[in-house]
Each structure stands twice: as C-alpha cells, then as structure tokens.
Image: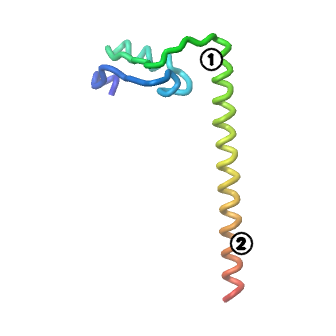
Amino acid sequence: MITNSEVEKIVILYKDRLLRFGFEIIENLCNKYGATIEIIDNTEKTEEQELVEDLIQIVTVFSCRLQGKRANKAKKIIKELLKDDTSKED
C-alpha cells in the first residue's frame, strides 16, 4: 500500500508497535513514497536501552517458539496415547 501511494500517514502509539526490528527501513520507504509515520509516544531512548529491548524481544520470540514446539509435541503424544487406548478397547 505504501509503494502504491495508498497510504499518507501511519499513526502508532509506540515505535516498536509497527515492527520489532527494522523501523528505519519502513521509515525510509514511507519517506520515498510520500507517507509519514506519526509516533504518539516518542520518548527518546539511548542506544543501550534500544539494544537491551531488542535483545529481550529476540529472547522472547525464541522462547515462545520453543514453548510452541513443546506444546505441539505434547499434543501429539497425548493424541497417540488416546489412539492406542481406543484401539486396545476394540
């Protein structure tokens, strides 16, 4: 939509709500196609604060992925156990 000039303004509450990483890429894309990004809470952060937040987000993403894989594995095991149990009854 941005590249088709269908968007004039993007309004977000926090900078990291648009993207977890690579905000500058989208910002440059918007500038190129005449769109603007308005950040309502634009509290300036130090580079160290941004780095810490980025690292926390990376750890969070991978943690969620691992938990999701474990949950899927547990569901498969339960399904197999139930399947085996019902086949024994027959």
Q: Would you identify the image quadrant in which residue 1 lies?
A: top left
Q: Residue at x 64, y 23 (%)?
A: 53
Q: Position of residue 52 (x, y in %)?
A: 68, 21
Q: Is residue 17 above or below residue 48?
A: below
Q: Position of residue 67 (x, y in %)?
A: 68, 47
Separation of disc 2 and disc 1 at Cα? 47 Å
- Along the viewing direction, whichever of 56 and 73 lies nearer the viewer: 56
Disc marking residue 81: 2
Disc marking residue 40: none
Left/right placement of residue 56 relative to residue 33 reads: right
Left/right placement of residue 23 relative to residue 64 reads: left
Q: Residue at x 64, y 24 (%)?
A: 54
Kind of residue at badge 2? Leu
Disc marking residue 50: 1
Q: Residue at x 44, y 16 (%)?
A: 27
Q: Are marks 2 and 1 in contact (CB under 8 Å)?
A: no
Q: Position of residue 23 (x, y in %)?
A: 50, 20
Q: Position of residue 75 (x, y in %)?
A: 66, 61
User: Mark 1: which secondary structure?
Assistant: helix
- Along the viewing direction, whichever of 44 and 90 lies nearer the viewer: 44
Q: Earlier in the sequence, mark 2 or mark 1?
A: 1
Q: Residue at x 56, y 24 (%)?
A: 21
Q: Residues within 10 Å of mark 1 (few under 14, many from 20)?
A: few
Q: Residues within 10 Å of mark 2 (few under 14, many from 20)?
A: few
How many numbered badges does the structure rendering display? Answer: 2
Quadrant that contains the C terminus: bottom right
Q: Would you identify the image quadrant in which residue 62 lies?
A: top right
Q: Is residue 76 above or below residue 67?
A: below
Kind of residue at badge 1? Glu
